Image: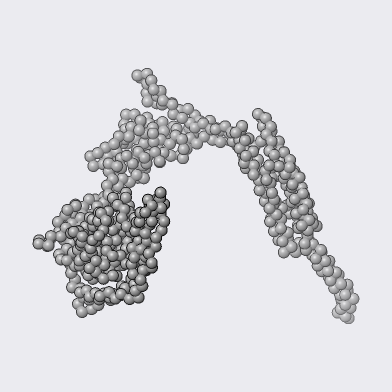
Amino acid sequence: MAKAKKFSILKKNLLPIILSLLLFILIILTYQVFMQDKFYPLTYVGNMNISFLTKAQAQKAIEANFQKRAQDKLAFNYPQGIFTVDLATSSAALDYTPVYEASNNSHKNLCFFVFQKIKPEISLDLNKQLDAIALAVDIEPQNAQLIFDETPDKDATSSSRIQIKDGTDGLALDRDRIIKEVESFLLNQRYQNILPTKIVPPKVGLNQVTRAKIALESLEKDPIELVFEGNSWTLDTKQLLTLLDLQKGEGLLLDKDQTSLYLDTIARDIDQEVRGGLFEFNATTKKVSAFQPSQEGRKLDKDKTYQLITAALTNPAPKIIQLPVDIIKPKTQTQDVNSLGIKELLGKGISRFAGSIQNRIYNINLTASKLNGVLVAPGETFSFNQTIGDISADTGFKQAYVIKEGRTVLDDGGGVCQVSTTVFRAVLYAGLPVIKRTAHAYRVGYYEQGFPPGLDATVFHPSVDFQFKNDTPAHILIQAYTAGNTLYIDLYGTSDGRKVSLTKPVVADQTPPPPELRQDDLTLPRGTVKQVDWAAWGANVSFKRVVTRGGGTIINEIWRSAYKPWQAIYLVGTQD
């Protein structure tokens, strides 16, 4: 009976409950539909209420207020006067992105209302006005200083001769705060009218100058001695004064830049480049003799020296510093040369350079001299560019014709490729693995004097290199020399029994050079004709190299070179 009564009551009230729930949902949905493109209640941008406004309406209202305020002039009070900031010249503008993002986020969360104060981004250009105010307001801080009595009494102590003058704080316009006050006015029409300033402490304070004074006094009677191999350099009070950090305020006792310059003068007497020995092989005695002895490298460790000097200035112990010098041993030392296994000729490269201009011949000999006597250790990869170094007038090279950017032009180092080509040939005949080789863009007549095409190797420091690897059990000695118009590269070492077979280069797909080209040149006298490029047939050239040892093949490769056809180019003078 009781259960029936409860069911009857529930049945009687169910419909009103459902209808109330549906009504509530309908109200929510209606509210959300009504507010879907509007800002919820209690939404502010600055001091402006944008509740129930659409984005377009809100932006229009905000912009109107903003532009009105952006025409005002703000006065900032200062003891020495009143300074005015004219907003009309500040190019003030609003970025409404934060306003739109706030609206989107609110609608995603299905809010009825949400209290939020949105701050859009403001862009301003107040630099010129603030610079003008800063000129009137800013006061430079004064660093603490050391003052020296140049004419002290004869009984004056060191500490009485060196006096300290404390630094004073400076004052500066607080630009960040004044910009915030301007932004506050543009959004809220309120700002603090007291000109904001801030204290600027000196870079060099009392503590740093006191440390400097103590360091100077410590050297009055006991200067620092810097010592290396019987040579010494004295760091006294006068020298130290030039090294102290009394301006930058980096918190360091010694100015790093000034100390580095001082140590550079010492390093000039200590530092030396590491130099491997250059050697000659005597075919009669089967021994190697040195014609340039090896030399160990030395380099003063300036960072460590800086630390040692700093420590000595704050340490009462005797001030003698053994300078830290890094020693670099040469890879090959003179006394070891005859234990390196250099016994016989492994391979010879030959090329001819008849018809070369004098500068080209000079560069060939210079390059050969840099290469002559170089040792390549077992397992080492030889780099032509690293061995020869920078190729420029600064390193002694003269201008001669080179292939550069697809043209034959005068440039520093013309003729260097004659040497790299000849090294390539020696390496081929020695049966050594070639790591990097690049053929010339077109066929060069010098490299085909008595030889077929395809046996050349170009270099261009530092990007295009020629490299080979010494995979023999002993060092390889490079001998480079000229006789008449012929360049020779000999590779000496210990043979491991390898045999080399080279096929004759096959020349295919030959194409004739294009017709000659004549170009007007205002720099040449009229009637002068100067050839700057030479005709050359294009071709694809290939040959095969097989290297065997003990019945097995260790290298089996095909070398290919693709040469472009090249036209002769003449410059014709047009200068009157």
Residue 519 left/right relative to 116: left
Reply above or below: 126 against 337: above
Q: What percent of the width, then of the height, locates residue 274?
A: 26, 51
> Which residue is depicted at the point 38% across and 56% down?
572
Q: What percent of the width, then of the height, locates residue 519?
A: 41, 58
Give whichever of 475, 363 is nearer the camera: 363
Instruction: Confirm whether residue 36 shows in the render.
Output: yes
Which residue sits furthest left? 284
Give whichever of 449, 323 is nearer the camera: 449
Where, by quadrant of the figure, is residue 28 drawn? Answer: bottom right
Give whichever of 341, 369 is nearer the camera: 369
Q: What percent of the width, then of the height, locates residue 104?
A: 72, 61
Q: What percent of the width, then of the height, locates residue 199?
A: 58, 35
> Which residue is depicted at the point 49% across and 34% down?
205
- Placement of the N terminus among the 4 image quadrants: bottom right
Residue 24 left/right relative to 177: right
Where, by quadrant of the figure, is residue 541 drawn? Answer: bottom left
Q: In this figure, what is the number of numbered marks?
A: 0
Residue 447 left/right relative to 183: left
> Which residue is depicted at the point 30% across and 40% down?
266
Where, by quadrant of the figure, is residue 12 drawn? Answer: bottom right
Reply above or below: 11 against 447: below
Reply above or below: 4 against 314: below
Reply above or below: 366 against 539: above
